Structures are given as structure tokens and as C-alpha cells.
Amino acid sequence: MAEDPVDIKLDLEKSCLEKECAKKVLAYNGCLERIKTAPAELEPHCYHQYFAIVHCVDVCVDPKLWPTLK
């Protein structure tokens, strides 16, 4: 009986968040803390930091994931 395929993408993403993208995660968390005290009329957000994390993870995972695909 064949084994079920294993999706390694989540593990790769977690590894990237903990290593290569850790500084971006810290920047995002810092932004979240800063906007807690910002006036609501300024419409504070952390979009730039969030998308920096997404981009970092994509760039990190891509070369590790593609060679494993069949």
C-alpha cells in the first residue's frame, strides 16, 4: 500500500519564519505593539511589514520546495 503524500510546505514556511525571516517577524510584531497606542483617526496599519514577511517566506521556501515536487 502506498503512503499518503506529505506536504512539507508548512514545515518549510515555519523554518523560514524562525530563521531567514525572523527580523521581519520582529518588525511586524513591533509595529503591532506601536499601533495599539496610535489614534484611530490615523488609521494605523502594518501592511508593509506583513507583506515583507510573506515575500520573505515565498523567496525562502521556493528553492527548497520545487525540487521535491513530482
Image: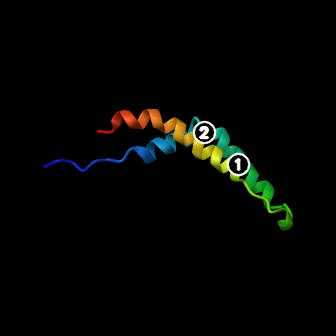
Q: Is residue 59 left or right of residue 43?
A: left
What is the secondary structure assignment of the residue under circle 1?
helix
CA distance separating discs 2 and 1: 14 Å
In the foreground, 58 or 38: 58
Tell me where residue 56 sits by quadrant. top right
Q: Residue 32 got which mark?
A: none
- Picture layout, residue 66 above or below residue 29: above
Q: Earlier in the sequence, mark 2 or mark 1?
A: 2
Q: Which residue is mark 2?
A: 21
Coordinates of residue 8 in the picture (x, y in percent): 38, 44
Residue displayed at 75% across by 57% down: 45
Coordinates of residue 64 in the picture (x, y in percent): 43, 34
* Badge 1: residue crowd in 10 Å (few <14, some 14–19, many ≥20): few
Residue placed farthest to the bottom in the image? 40
- Picture layout, residue 67 above or below residue 13: above
Residue displayed at 58% across by 46% down: 54
In the foreground, 43 or 12: 43
Q: Nearer the viewer, mark 2 or mark 1?
A: 1
Q: Which residue is mark 1?
A: 48
Tell me where residue 65 sits by quadrant. top left
| Amino acid type of the residue that numbered disc 1 sits on in the rendered structure | His
Coordinates of residue 12 in the picture (x, y in percent): 46, 41
Residue displayed at 49% across by 44% down: 13
Q: Is residue 38 left or right of residue 67?
A: right
| Amino acid type of the residue that numbered disc 2 sits on in the rendered structure | Cys
Q: Quadrant of the C terminus?
A: top left
